[in-house]
Image (cartoon, rainbow, N blue to C red):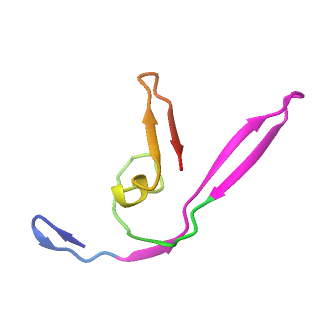
């Protein structure tokens, strides 16, 4: 991985990115809808400390769709 301070070597992973939309039907049951990107993504492993996330998405992924973030702390990603 090339950064502002030069090259830094990290293990990398190939993975597929998917999203789960938990829609609720009229009886209150959740019906998950799965959306999976067609392309594989390569990303380095990094130490995120105590952060509570699995993957940090970059602009290469976010630019494939539209990311909307609200002041209420919710978000929507559509593609």
In the picture, measured across the screen, residue 58 lies left or right of residue 76, that is left
Q: Farthest residue toward the top? A: 72
Nearer-the-camera pick, 4 or 64:
64
Q: Farthest residue toward the left? A: 5
Please determine whether, in this image, residue 60 is positioned above or below residue 33: below
In the picture, measured across the screen, residue 23 lies left or right of residue 37, that is right
Q: Residue at x 44, y 42 (%)?
A: 67
Q: Residue at x 46, y 27 (%)?
A: 73
- x%, y% of residue 47? 34, 60
Q: Residue at x 38, y 68 (%)?
A: 45
Q: Farthest residue toward the right? A: 27
Provide the residue span drawn in magenta: 11-35
- Quadrant housing residue 57: bottom left
How many labels, in total?
Answer: 0
Nearer-the-camera pick, 64 or 76:
64
- x%, y% of residue 19? 60, 52
Please determine whether, in this image, residue 73 is positioned above or below residue 46: above
Q: Residue at x 74, y 37 (%)?
A: 23
Membership of 47 in magenta stretch: no
- x%, y% of residue 70? 44, 27
Nearer-the-camera pick, 47 or 17:
17
Please determine whether, in this image, residue 73 is positioned above or below residue 60: above
Please determine whether, in this image, residue 3 is positioned above or below residue 55: below
In the picture, measured across the screen, residue 75 lies left or right of residue 10, that is right
Membership of 30 in magenta stretch: yes
Nearer-the-camera pick, 63 or 16:
63
Look at the magenta stretch and give its main secondary structure.
strand
- x%, y% of residue 54? 48, 55
Q: Quadrant of the N terminus?
A: bottom left
């Amino acid at each position: 991985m090339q950064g502002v301070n030069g090259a830094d070597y990290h293990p990398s992973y190939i993975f597929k990115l998917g999203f789960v939309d938990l829609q609720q039907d009229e009886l209150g049951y959740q019906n998950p809808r799965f959306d999976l990107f067609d392309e594989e993504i390569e990303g380095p492993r990094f130490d995120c400390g105590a952060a509570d996330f699995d993957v940090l998405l970059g602009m290469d992924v976010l630019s494939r769709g539209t990311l909307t973030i609200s002041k209420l702390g919710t978000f929507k990603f559509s593609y």
